[in-house]
Amino acid sequence: MDERNSERRHAEAWKSQEETGIHITLEQVCTRARRRERKSFREFWMWMVTVGFLVTVFSVYLVALPQPLVQMSCVSGILIFLYLGVRIARNRQSLRFNDATRAEACVDFLRAELSRKRDEALHIRWVMCLLFPCALGFWWGGGSVAILEWLGIDWPWQLRFNASPGPLVVFAVLLALTWIGCGKEAQSFEREIERLSKQAIS
C-alpha cells in the first residue's frame, strides 16, 4: 500500500511538473522511468497472451471448418497475428537501467520508451486493418454460420445475423475504433516526448 501511495504521489508530482514547466528532480524522473519499465513489462505479457489466444482460436477454426475460403482466411489471420507478436517482441528489446544515478540515463530511457510506444501504436493500427480482408473471406466463405453450427447453436436470429453483413459491419466499426484509439495514443506519447524535452532536470 505504501509503495502504491508513493507511486501515486510521484505521478501527481510529475503531472504538476508537466503542467507548470518548472524543474523536476532526478528522483522524480527516475521514478517515472522505473514505472514505465514495469508497465511496459506487463503490457508485453498481455500482448503475448492475447496473440497466443487468437492464434489458437484461428488454428482451431482452421481444423474444424473445411471450407477452403474460410481456411485461407484462418491461415492469413494466423500469419498476421504471428507477425504482430514477433514485431512487438522485437520492439520490447528497449533500453534498461538498474537504479540509474544520472538524470540523462533516466531521460534517455523515457524518451526511447515513449518513442517506441508511439511507433508501436501507429504500426498496430495498420496491421489490424489487414484483418478486414480475412474477415471478409471468412464471412463470404460461410465461416460465421459454420461456427454456430459447429458449436451447436441453432438460434434462428443468430443464424440470420451471422448470414447477413452484420458481422462485417461490427468488425469494421471495431477496426475504426482501433484506428482512432491508436492514433490518439500515439499523439499522447508524442506530446509527452515534447514535454519531456522541454523540462529541466535538477
Image: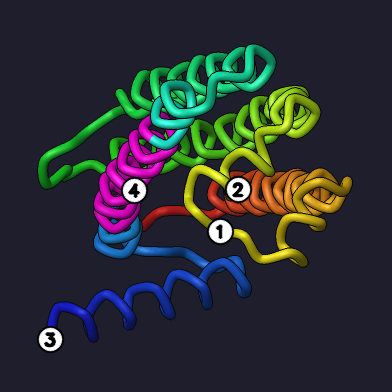
Residue type at tag 2 = Phe
Say what secondary structure mark 1 lies in. Answer: loop
Residue type at tag 1 = Ile
Residue that carries the numbered disc 3 in the rendered image? 2
Label 4 vs label 3: CA separation?
A: 26 Å
Magenta segment boundaries in residue numbering: 33-56
Residue that carries the numbered disc 4 in the rendered image? 46
Residue type at tag 4 = Met
Measured as percent of width and height from the top left, residue 39 is found at 32, 54
Residue for point 74% across, 64% down: 156
Left or right: where does residue 98 sit relative to residue 176? left
Q: Do the residues labelled 1 and 3 touch (CB within 8 Å)?
A: no
Residue for point 54% across, 50% down: 196
Of badges 2 and 4, the one in the foreground is: 4
Residue type at tag 3 = Asp
Left or right: where does residue 100 sit relative to residue 89? left
Q: Mark 4 or mark 2, which is nearer the start of the sequence?
A: 4
Residue 153: assigned label:
1
Residue 189: assigned label:
2
Label 3 vs label 2: CA separation?
A: 28 Å
